[in-house]
Amino acid sequence: MTGGRAGYAFTADEVRRLSGDPDLPAAASGLELSDRTLLADLTRLRRTVGELAPAVAETVRLRRRAVPKFGPAAAGWLLTEESLQQGSPAPVAVHRAGRLGGLGVHDLTCSIGADLTVLAGRGTAVGSDLDPVRVLMAAHNLGASGVPGRVFIADALSRSTSGLLGYADPARREGGRRITGVDTLPSVADLDRVHADRLPVLRLPPGIDFDALARPGEVEIVSLDGSARESVLWPPELAVVSRRATVLRTDGPTEVLTSDDPSDSAVLSVGEYLVDPDPAVVRSGLVRHWAVRHGLSQIDPHLAYLTGPAVPPWTRGFRVLEVAEYRERTVRDWLRRDGVGTLEIKQRGTPVVPDDLRRTLRPAMSRDTRVARTLVVARVGRGQLAVWCEAVDPVRG
């Protein structure tokens, strides 16, 4: 069994045997299977499942992590480490499938079928992938989820179905290296070229430069519980606006903001509260629109930080205690005066490196970690502004 982030490399024979005997993983159900106990656990497993011990152990380890992300059905899935990391959390996948409105869909890069199971549960859906092992896993996972669907081996850069809308989630890694630019595998340009008669829906990393892609249609940035999860490029046939921010919450209401919403926000000096909008709002370029909706103002036209008399519900914010031109000496004075033992440092548009600054300021800090403050250093106009704050718990309502 191999360790590391790449995870275990399943063979097609192992997948067939695991799929054909759903009781096999039960042999490992009572084992801890942590990094500390794994060698001993594998020794015990070999007594009952023989050469399948590494595959069984990896399957159980992955399932334990998959259930919170994908839902209860994943307790019976077959997965890989990469597919678990890259797959959409259930609320995100359900939201995306809901926008497809029951259309027939071909998941061109279905991998182990995490998205395909959601699509197939809402309408006609088929899946394909170049990796035969993942195709076997996807077929198993459809059955384990109790949804119909067909899965087969095919290249996303080929035409293997007709009359179905393509959906693709191109790879984010190449040889273990994370792809950070607009390049994906396969590329957006190649996918659009092959499927030019009906452009596919594309799921991409949330930080991708969609302006550089210059693709027609709608860009939707989706977040879940304060973390940006994906960019979805909707083709013209499904586009409603040019940009959309969708803020999903597992225990709260969904908020949707679009480029058609009012955006004439004011720019004012820092007021009673500083507000940090959700990453979906920031990455979609809809900060001004969100400010207008919630009665807030920008502190600079180029910054995402907003200010106002209150923090909107479900949003992270800070009560402003002091505002001054940024100088380390001023910050040290604030630290000593307030007896701060825990300091969060956030910066926007400045050369400040939070970890380096925290080390420099450490001698001025208290040992009482219960006293916490947040320092925001931001470029406002041509100067650097220091905002001394106290974090406030989000209002849930």
Image (cartoon, rainbow, N blue to C red):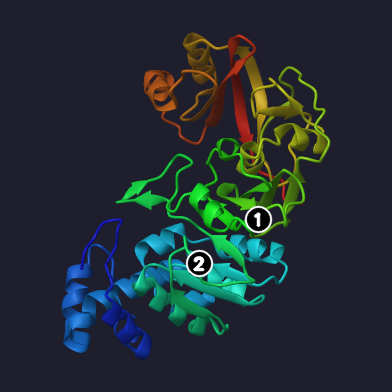
Judge left or right: residue 53 versus residue 164.
Answer: left
Position of the N terminus, as image quadrant, is: bottom left
Label located before the other in sequence (1 or 2)? 2
Q: In the image, is residue 230 above or below residue 393?
A: below
Q: Residue at x 48, y 75 (%)?
A: 74
Q: Is 307 placed left or right of 388 in the picture?
A: right
Residue 157 percent coordinates (x, y): 47, 60
What label sits on residue 68 in the rendered view?
2
Q: Residue 252 in the image: state x and y as whole percent.
A: 70, 57
Q: How far is mark 1 from mark 2, CA to CA? A: 15 Å
Viewer-closest of 254 and 152: 152
Residue 23 position in % (x across, y down): 35, 90
**Amino acid at circle 2:** Pro
Please say if the residues under marks 1 and 2 sit with CB atoms less than 8 Å apart: no
- Residue position for label 1: 249
Q: Callout 1, which amino acid?
A: Arg
Asked whether 247 or 313 is in front, the reply is 247
Callout 2 secondary element: helix
Mark 2 closeness class: few <14, some 14–19, many ≥20 residues within 10 Å: few
